[in-house]
Image (cartoon, grey):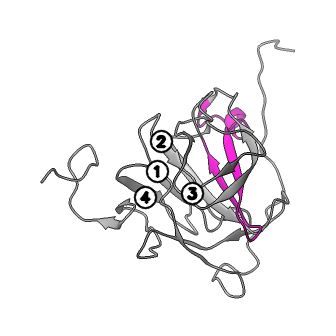
Amino acid sequence: MDADLDLDSDVQAVTVHPNPSAPPLPCHTHLAFPLQGTHLCTQSPGGAFTHHFAGNHHAVDFRSPPHTPVLAADDATVLEVSDTNTLSGIHVGCLFKWNSIMLQLPDGAVAEYVHIAHNSAKVKPGDKVSKGDVICLSGAVGFCPEPHLHFQLLENPDPKAVSLPCRFGPSSFEPQCGKYYNEQGEVVEVDEAGEMPSA
């Protein structure tokens, strides 16, 4: 047997979302945009790449330079913090090696932030955070083809909980893949770096 052989598997039962078109699932509106600055939405709810499971159907991904400040979606209690992993890339061995923070919102829903940077958490379990607080920095840890933040809401902390629809900012917008956003909503004009043009 080859001692250098490295085998990994991601085989698991696929659970599809029981009702992906919102009702009767509650939709959380006016959440704080999860990142400082302007960012491209690279995968929106129901995205064909990875957003087709029950637990992440309503998730959104935003391309973000490493170490971009990540913000609390609402007033919340910190449930879990994992920021010790360092693996990155699209090897199957990275699938379950991500870093994340989970916040429990006042109604029991859970906001999860995935692929955060190694040792970047600014909070610990049990901490209370306010909407818009910086909780960590974005990264590219885990199964991650490029640096980005994966954000999702779950109905509760159960590992089998389904995802919930969510909207951001004062205008309560839902990000769509291929468009740029900041806390105010869609940004039509961006420069090559993905930033709003200066006035």
| Left or right position of 93 against 175 | right
State the separation of the CA atoms marked 1 and 3. Answer: 22 Å
Q: Quick one: 92 or 17, which is closer to the camera? A: 17
The number of discs equals 4
User: What mark, if any, has residue 49 been given in the picture?
Assistant: 3
Residue 181, placed above or below residue 69: below
Spot occupied by residue 82 in the image (x, y as percentages of width and height): 72, 37
Highlighted range, magenta: 88-115
Does the magenta-highlighted stretch encompass residue 107? Answer: yes
Residue at left offset 59%, top offset 31%? 120
State the separation of the CA atoms marked 4 and 3. Answer: 13 Å
Q: Amino acid at mark 1?
A: Leu
Q: Amino acid at mark 4?
A: Cys
Residue at left offset 47%, top offset 59%? 33
Residue at image mark 4: 41
Q: Residue 187's quadrant in the figure? A: bottom left
Spot occupied by residue 31 in the image (x, y as percentages of width and height): 54, 67
Residues tagged 1 and 2 counted as in contact (Cβ below 8 A): yes
Residue at left offset 77%, top offset 13%? 4
Q: Quick one: 43 or 181, which is closer to the camera? A: 181
Residue at image mark 2: 69
Mark 2, Cα crowd under 10 Å, few <14 / some 14-19 / many 20+, is many
Residue at image mark 1: 35
Q: Residue 176's quadrant in the figure? A: bottom left
User: Quarter holding the N terminus?
Assistant: top right
